[in-house]
Amino acid sequence: MKKYLVVLVALLLVVTGCGAKKLTCTMTEDGQTMEAVMEFDKNDEVTSIKMNMTMPFEEELSKEEQETYSSYMQVLCSMYDYEGVDCNVNTSSKAVDVVIKMDLEKMSDEDRNNVTGTEGTTYDEIKADLEESGYTCK
């Protein structure tokens, strides 16, 4: 019975992607916070990216100003109109949050290059690119 249990646990670890890497990079600039979380497969290729940008306002916004700002940020989301990409905007009176989720496995190579802005898709390539851009990665 123990042999079957060990085999089952080992199989579950393989199926659930044990050994896959995760890279989290953040940057704060002018009060704005940007975070990118990337997941990589066993071949060290990026499979998904979740970006979260938080931009606080200097003054609280009225409802009308929030709607205007939200519409403006939706234009940003329209730039990510690709298969496998989901972009959401949440605007409050104090800040706007933009969350972009990308499933790179559902994207064509061309779309993936357009969205990521780089042809490099491995852990080391992406980490180096982001750190060169001012992000802190761990």
Image (tube, rainbow, N blue to C red):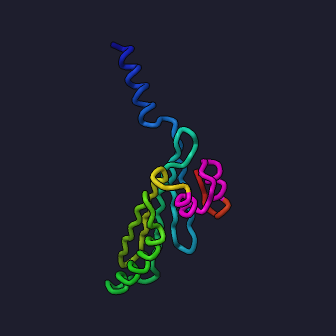
Q: Is residue 127 magenta?
A: yes
Task: Describe residue 84's horizontal placement relative to residue 115 as left or right.
Answer: left
Task: Describe residue 134's horizontal placement relative to residue 70 as left or right.
Answer: right
Dominant SS in magenta: helix
Label count reads 0
Q: Residue at x 61, y 48 (%)?
A: 122
61 or 42: which is nearer to us?
A: 42
Hey, which quadrant is residue 133 in on the image? bottom right
Q: Residue at x 52, y 42 (%)?
A: 41
Task: Specify the quadrant that holds the N terminus.
Answer: top left
117 or 70: which is nearer to us?
A: 117
Residue 8: % across, % down: 37, 23
Residue 95: % across, % down: 41, 74
Task: Describe residue 25's horizontal placement relative to residue 75 as left or right.
Answer: right
Q: Is residue 15 above or below residue 130?
A: above
Q: Is residue 54 magenta?
A: no
Query: Which stretch did the figure color magenta?
Result: 110-131
Q: Is residue 28 above or below residue 101?
A: below
Residue 111: % across, % down: 52, 60
Q: Residue at x 56, y 46 (%)?
A: 45
Residue 92: % across, % down: 35, 75
Q: Residue at x 39, y 70 (%)?
A: 89
Hey, which quadrant is residue 28 in on the image? bottom right
84 or 61: which is nearer to us?
A: 84
72 or 84: which is nearer to us?
A: 84
